[in-house]
Amino acid sequence: VITMFSQSGCFFPRNAIVFYDENDRIFEIIEICFECGNVESYPSKFFNWKKACELIYPELEKFFQSKGLQTQYKEK
């Protein structure tokens, strides 16, 4: 269930951070939409993105891009 939207209604996360426990089981997923700046985490809300430093999005986006991942929609 998506609960966060921008004014334009955008929330199409193309990137995520997946956390694994010591048994290689997923315990948390953070989905990120760099286009509208919204974030969702499942199953919990262990990180308060609204209180995060305003630099976190550009730095995360740079990190994803440095790994060759697309962060923005680009028409072909």
Image (spheres, grey):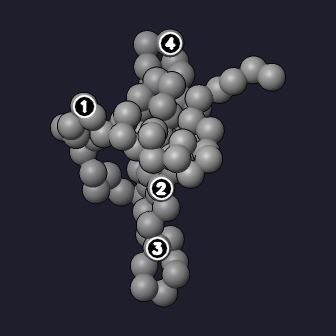
User: Tag 2 or tag 4, which sits nearer the N-term?
Assistant: 4
**Residue drawn at point x = 52 percent, y = 47 percent:** 66
* Foreground tag (4 vs 2): 2
State the CA–CA distance, disc 4 to disc 2: 24 Å
**Mark number, residue 17:** 2
Residue 58 is situated, as x and y percent measured from the top left of the image, at 37, 34
State the CA–CA distance, disc 1 to disc 4: 20 Å
Circle 1 sits in a helix, a strand or a loop, which is it?
loop
Q: Is residue 73 left or right of residue 60?
A: right
Identify residue for label 3. 20
Q: Could one spot residue 46 in this view of the protein? A: yes
Q: Do the residues labelled 4 and 2 touch (CB within 8 Å)?
A: no
| Local crowd size for mark 2, using a 10 Å CA cut-off: few (<14), some (14–19), many (≥20) | few
Circle 3 sits in a helix, a strand or a loop, which is it?
strand
Question: Is 1 in front, or is 57?
Answer: 57
**Residue drawn at point x = 57 percent, y = 36 percent:** 71
| Local crowd size for mark 3, using a 10 Å CA cut-off: few (<14), some (14–19), many (≥20) | few
Q: Is residue 12 left or right of residue 60?
A: right
* Foreground tag (1 vs 4): 1
Residue 2 is situated, as x and y percent measured from the top left of the image, at 50, 37
**Mark number, residue 8:** 4
User: Tag 4 or tag 3, which sits nearer the N-term?
Assistant: 4
| Local crowd size for mark 1, using a 10 Å CA cut-off: few (<14), some (14–19), many (≥20) | few
Q: Are marks 2 and 1 in contact (CB under 8 Å)?
A: no
Pick out the residue farthest to the front: 66
Q: Which amino acid does label 3 sit on?
A: Tyr
State the CA–CA distance, disc 1 to disc 3: 26 Å
User: Tag 1 or tag 2, which sits nearer the N-term?
Assistant: 2
* Foreground tag (3 vs 4): 3
Identify residue for label 1. 54
| Local crowd size for mark 4, using a 10 Å CA cut-off: few (<14), some (14–19), many (≥20) | few
